[in-house]
Image: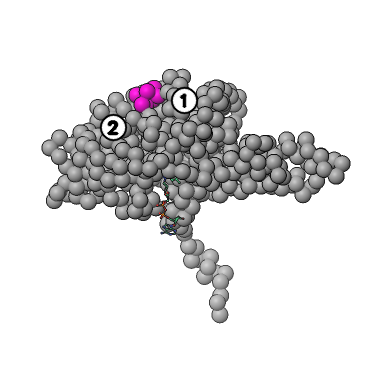
Amino acid sequence: MSVVAAPAKTSRLFAAGPFGERVEKARNRVAGLLRQTFEPVAERAETEGLFPRDALTRLGAAGLFQERWDGADGVDPYGDPGLGVIIAEESGRLGHASLSVGLSLHCETVLSILTRFGDTPLLAAYRAEALEGRLVGCLGASEPAGGSDLNGVRTVARRTPGGWRVTGEKKYLSLGLVCDVALLLCRLDEGSGPVAGRLGLLAVPASGLTPRKRLSKAGTAALDTTWMVVDTEVADEALVGRPGGGLLVATWGLNHERLSIAAQAVGGAARAIALATAHLQRREQFGKPLIEQQALRLRLAELSSRLVALRYAVYAAAQGVPVPGACGTREIAALKTTAARFVEEVMSECLHLFGGPGYLEDETPMARMWRDSRLARLGGGTDEMMWELVAGGLVPDHAAYDESVDLG
Ligand SMILES: Cc1cc2nc3c(=O)[nH]c(=O)nc-3n(C[C@H](O)[C@H](O)[C@H](O)COP(=O)(O)OP(=O)(O)OC[C@H]3O[C@@H](n4cnc5c(N)ncnc54)[C@H](O)[C@@H]3O)c2cc1C
């Protein structure tokens, strides 16, 4: 199945638009389920530095992943992108960025790939278990040698009589310590075969991964991210998609991850602005609530205005124009980087509006939210990589130039 030839698909949830009673009902249901699932485990996960795997099991058992990915008529390569962004937005709004990132890696990145490209019986079985939350998946693309230039991947999958021997290192494997299966981008080595040296994505069981180092991070503590050594043999049918198509398959997953990051940013920014608004209403200085200071009120209004625009754009992307996939890669990259930079700014400004307590870990959640938000500009591809995708679509208007520019 070619990604480029994929037909546009409209979200079922957004069939009558991204607002209205139907969407709000679904939003409230999803928000309630996420709150119920995340709240009891969030603090402990932060302290332990380990993603609470059971949370994904519970969300799967509640049918959330099934609803996201299985169409009314069975397997649907797009599932319901509208529901995908509502899940991401509401998880972001809860303020536990580590948990929303982990949820998104499993529910968007991995499940999008297995749904579209998991053609073999082994991969179909992984997908079925992942939908039920019994199997947790993650994606390993970045390596010590590089994350931006994925063509430089050095992990090798060598042909064996029954499959592939995979050896190498993946530097940043988020969910690596709790996953059952990792989708790893590898350089294929078939000797002198036609795909030798090209990339493939292989589903590797956790038993083939050995932690080399648990990474200590600036934020998102509850999302375990581990430098892994891989050395194992997998069956032929562990290859996801065609040999040589690894980058395309990974990009399909990354597009879903990027749109999800943008939606998480919408939810996270909304939470921060709402918290700061409440603080400005309650906190008095110079004999009146801070919200009465026009400079502060308008600063929140300005952030809030940009949030409205971003939210509409994310919904439009999920509504089917563009579809997550190659035809929408540029637009999604534009949204991801804009959202990531925006949410970092919002967190910093809202922290500031709390004054000193914004910087205190045990008085407000602002410091953690600020630190956590920074990952959005790196994970799923950096700002520069997103802008390179956008730059590739820049279109010059020579006619207008010739008409209106005269350099003398
Ligand atoms: C907490 C965390 C979790 C992560 N989880 C995962 C995961 O689960 N799976 C996974 O595969 N990866 C993961 N990553 C890796 C992440 O995707 C990479 O760190 C990111 O893509 C950048 O790669 P790099 O670190 O190798 O930086 P580099 O590629 O070395 O880039 C360094 C800097 O140079 C810039 N740059 C590079 N090339 C160019 C260029 N041509 N033009 C302009 N600027 C350029 C980059 O934008 C960046 O600012 C994670 C990272 C972190 C921090």
Q: Which amino acid does label 2 sit on?
A: Ser
Q: Nearer the viewer, residue 101 or 402?
A: 101
Q: Label 2 neighbourhood size at 10 Å, few (<14), some (14-19), many (20+)?
A: few
> Which quarter of the image is occupied by the N terminus?
top left
Residue 55: give its label: 1
State the SS at label 2. helix
- Residue 233: percent from left, percent from top: 21, 36
- Residue 336: percent from left, percent from top: 50, 46
- Would residue 388 appear left or right of 92 to someone viewing this image? left
State the SS at label 1. helix
- Residue 315: percent from left, percent from top: 54, 37
Q: Which of 38 and 213 is in front in this view?
A: 213
Q: What residue type is labelled 1?
A: Ala
- Does residue 31 show up? yes
Q: Give the range drawn in magenta.
A: 129-135
Q: What residue is disc 2 on?
A: 207
- Does residue 316 show up? no
Q: Quadrant of residue 213?
A: top left
Residue visible at 31% across and 33% down in the picture? 206
